[in-house]
Image: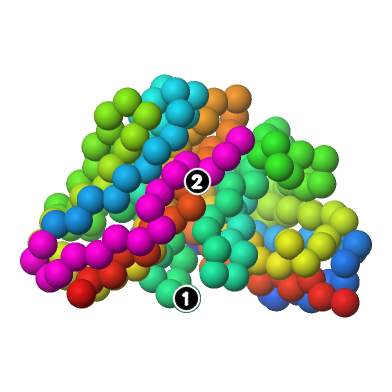
Amino acid sequence: QVQLVQSGAEVKKPGASVNVSCKASRDTFTSSHIHWVRQAPGQGLVWMGIINPNNGVTSYAPKFQGRVTMTRDTSTSTVYMEVRSLSSDDTALYYCARGSLDDIWRVDYWGQGTLVTVSS
Amino acid sequence: QSALTQPPSASGSPGQSVTISCTGTSSDVGRYNSVSWYQQHPGEVPKLMIYGVNKRPSGVPDRFSGSKSGNTASLTVSGLQAEDEADYYCNSYAGSNNVIFGGGTKLTVL
């Protein structure tokens, strides 16, 4: 069974950083790529990037390159995403999601989402 | 890298068919057959409805179908039901290890 369990909601001030975690079942962690997608309130889905948990190789959407870092901890089957220099525009629900086993660029299972609120 | 273009809204009566378009470019939708569609009900996580342009995951009703012509992909929902009312998003592989989503379409069942 695919399980992606994300960390709880965060409230941050402008200029701060946030680190969101996504704990995967062991099978998912070792066999899949993990995507991060965000959704601002009332807005659409925006793809942020992808990480291969096996080797840590990442690819980021041009919009987030240089401001987002995705990492993983193999001992706990957890993937992390750090977003730096937060502004109110970063207030959103952040999802981790599994890349499909036969096409890593297709998301098939989603975490429950982590709400990040940026407010002074 | 702009979002794929979807109409903001679509609607149909129960039993009717409705088609939602998703327009990209020759660098994404037009080049790759890695187009997916997601359904999202309010307060819920997105659900994969169509992948690989026209394939349905197990459990998705065959009322949902997908197609592609040139740079435009389409999702058709036949025999509309009340529970089909939701937001729908397309996405596509865009090359250079990137993925792009559409802006979303709110489907209303009248």
For marks 2 and 1 on the same chain, the one whose residue lies earlier in the sequence: 1
Residue in view at x 31 percent, y 64 percent: B107
Residue in view at x 78 percent, y 47 percent: A68
Q: Which residue is mark 2?
A: B101
Residue in view at x 71 percent, y 67 percent: A91
- Residue A54: where, in percent of width, then height? 65, 37
Tag 2, which secondary structure? strand
Q: Which residues are magenta?
A: B1-16
Q: Which residue is mark 1?
A: B43
Check whether the beta carbons of the residues at disc 2 and disc 1 lie within 8 A of each other: no
Give the quadrant of residue B35: top left
Q: Amino acid at mark 1?
A: Gly
* Helix, strand or loop: magenta stretch: loop
Q: Nearer the viewer, residue A84 or A8?
A: A84
Give the quadrant of residue A95: bottom right
Task: Quarter of the image for the N terminus of chain A: give it.
Answer: bottom left
